[in-house]
Image (cartoon, helix red, strand yellow):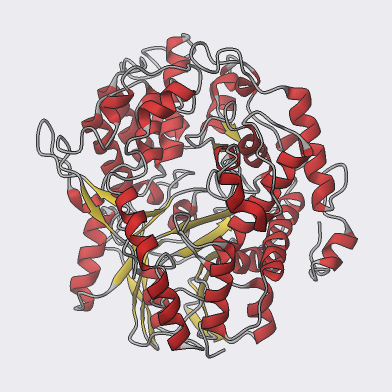
Amino acid sequence: MELGYRGNILRVNLSSDKISIERPDEIFYRKYIGGEGFIAYYLLKEVPKGVNPLNYKNNLIFANGPLTGTSIPCTGRNSIGAKSPLTGGFGESEVGGYWGAELKHAGFDAVIVEGKANKPVYLSIQDEEIEIRDASHLWGKSTGETQKDIIRELDDKYIRVACIGVAAENLVKYACIINDYRNAAGRTGMGAVMGSKNLKAIAVRGHNKPKVNNKEKLRAILKESYETFKEYSQFFTFGTGGNRMEEFALSGNLPTRNFRDGEFKYAKEIDPAIISEKINLGRDTCYACPIRCKKVVNISNPINIDPLYGGPEYETIAAFGSNCGTNDIVAISKANEICNKTSLDTISAGVAISFAMECYENKILTDEDTNGLKLNFGNSQAMLSLLEKIVNREGLGDILAEGVKKAAEKIGKNSQKFAIHVKGQEVPMHEPRLKQGMGIGYALSPTGAEHMANLHDTAIANKERIKNFASFNIFDALTLDDLSAKKVKSVISFTNWRVVENSLLFCFFSPYTMNQENNLLKTVTGWDTSTWELMKYGERITTMARAFNIREGFNKNDDWLPERFFEPHTTGALAEKPINSDKFKNARDIYYKMMGWTEDGIPTKMKLEELDIEWVKT
């Protein structure tokens, strides 16, 4: 492979210190494309059925896409996957920054990490020079300290580092991996897998950009999209939460007090657009991207918050803000810093704390259980103290470090009704009682509740906006609470397309249309791809991830939402609008049929053959 891809897969066995390079053929690249597709392939092929996710036999895969490392904006991402320690199923997460592009420049499309080192190590990849180095002096350090120390040690300021902090070393089940100080591969617990291998970091440096098939055409496409990117950049001036918090609160979309309540009167006080001066809001970006959507806060009073670790985006603001009942933006920003420096998923951490708060307010947890912490909703200082306990696995924090599903099993006393998760993964900050198609996506996602590779129903609820989705075979505007076959079809189309983007490694905030993304792929690789072929990529990879979960013991009962969502909010716009469980069950069954699965949600042999993955076992 000479165009877009580098044709090299790096394999590192930490148990034997063996380093090798594999060179797959072009059919492999075209069939599995990159990112999530590579991960699904290698997990099914190489990870033993039933293996403990923290066992050395679980592989950790870092994968690029065909456009990674080119000059195309919104492609500076990489994907990381393994069997998830949080769910026990398919684990995958994407992350921005510069690391993925640097890996491509070093000559690799993916890195497969096998085994377990007998002491802490880090991997150095500098073009063809690959070395497993001692990291004993880095173990116990923050992600920021780790990256700075490695850059000094390797004596190159352009080194890019993906690493873990203390939470991942302590095997918190929703620990993440951090690229470039503030970019998180946040979901499914990939940091815990990295920690279980005694792998502290992977440092990369490359000097050769990938070749593209048609440079002139690529320049023309990028020039044509310049104005669109300017407009998008203005939209992200205040980040993903800017000018939206009060709107979300009024509509019922802002999760409040563990998804229980429907009103949060302090929404303006946690809106970045309104309080930007208070937190000294700045902006950062990823490789070759002019949008600059990454947030940076710099606060010294009343507490110091290091701008090195960025600032909270919408998911983090809602998880540690409204969902924990607090309007303290400084505490929310501090929680973001703690998570990034220790490598912890902000969504799962915030939901774990809100779960504990509701248990405390219902006297399921006592002061003795919390070691004196008053875990009432709105107690931001108790929130931060409990977060540190999760990181260090101390007391109640040790239980919450397992995720809310296992924590509820441990605590008992009917606490399960307060554990808001799907398949063991905590629900993101978008309300499925409002966006009911997204609820289907939550339930059917192979990684557990997932908001990125999903339909946001608001995108197809407006007659004007629906015109943008004709290429998805979606023509009719559908209400937010619609659970018809048309809505299910829309969920499938959106999900499969997002999976394609997770394999091409396009950012979720990319302004490109489906046709534009296909044209970029053709321009870089020289392949004569069609949008039909790309949608088949998405269906193939979605089905492979499903097959992995079926193999690992998941069944249709796992394709469900927490019972809380079949009850209304206590107040607000959704106070009389729960999800109808019968309609939801019917929508799930329709989803199975449309995907070519059995009534139990198992991909049929015929469907596997149609997708050219007959080798996959379920």
Asked if residue 114 shows in the view, the reply is no
Against 540, is 439 above or below?
A: above
Tell which of 412 and 72 is nearer to you: 72
Does residue 149 appear left or right of residue 124 in this picture?
left
Is residue 144 placed above or below 479 in the rendered structure?
below
The x, y position of residue 302, in whole percent, is: 11, 30
Q: Nearer the viewer, residue 52 or 157?
A: 157
Q: Name the residue: 42% across, 24% down.
A: 249
On-image quarter of the C terminus? bottom right
Q: Residue at x 30, y 62 (%)?
A: 180
How many marks do you count on the picture? 0
Image spot of residue 609 (x, y percent)? 86, 67
Outermost residue, front side? 464
Q: Quadrant of residue 317?
A: top left
For the point 71% across and 54% down, the residue is 473
Using the image as rendered, state which of residue 454 and residue 176 is in the foreground: 454
Q: Residue farthest to the top? A: 363
Q: Is 303 displayed left or right of 563 in the figure? A: left
Q: Which residue lies furthest to the left in this view?
A: 301
Residue 570 visible (yes or no): yes
Which of 435 and 362 lies nearest the eye of the viewer? 435
Q: Position of residue 590 (x, y in %)?
A: 81, 40
